[in-house]
Image (spheres, rainbow, N blue to C red):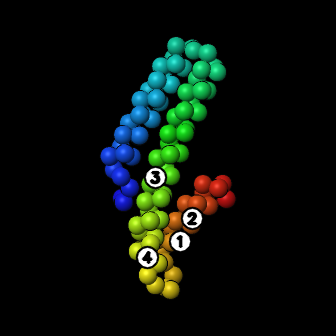
Amino acid sequence: MKADKEKVTRQLKIARGQVDGLLRMVEEDRYCVDISNQLQATIAILRRVNQEVLHAHIRGCVREGLGTDEPNEKLEEALSLLDRLAGL
């Protein structure tokens, strides 16, 4: 992985802590809007982590793979990821 591992790890640990908090909130039958707000915060962190990983992939692996006009597995992989993110 070409992304900043420390940054990605830190963000994922924060998201994990938020998911643990969400589980407690559900078990405690907390107010739905509070749970939803926490869910949105967790989703936002995961989106940022995914963006970090994909940016690093494109800047590293894909850039390396573009050194040729031949079909490139890494480029196709990145394009497939983008399609999934767009819901295609």
Vertical comparison of 38 with 63: above or below: above
Q: Residues within 10 Å of mark 4 (few under 14, many from 20)?
A: some
Question: Residue at horizontal 61%, vertical 26%?
Answer: 36
Q: Are marks 2 and 1 in contact (CB under 8 Å)?
A: yes
Could you tell me which secondary element the residue under label 4 belongs to?
helix
**Furthest-bottom residue in this view:** 69
- The circle on residue 65 is 4
Q: Are marks 2 and 4 in contact (CB under 8 Å)?
A: no
> Where residue 56 sits: x, y (%)?
43, 59
Q: Nearer the viewer, mark 4 or mark 3?
A: 3
Could you tell me which secondary element the residue under label 3 belongs to?
helix
Distance between mark 3 and mark 1 Cα atoms: 19 Å
Distance between mark 4 and mark 1 Cα atoms: 10 Å
Q: Nearer the viewer, mark 2 or mark 3?
A: 3
Distance between mark 4 and mark 3 Cα atoms: 19 Å
- Kindly identify the amino acid type of the residue bearing the numbered disc 4: Gly
Quadrant containing the C terminus in the rendered view: bottom right
According to the picture, the residue beneath numbered tag 2 turns out to be 80
Could you tell me which secondary element the residue under label 2 belongs to?
helix
According to the picture, the residue beneath numbered tag 1 turns out to be 76
19 on left or right of 37: left
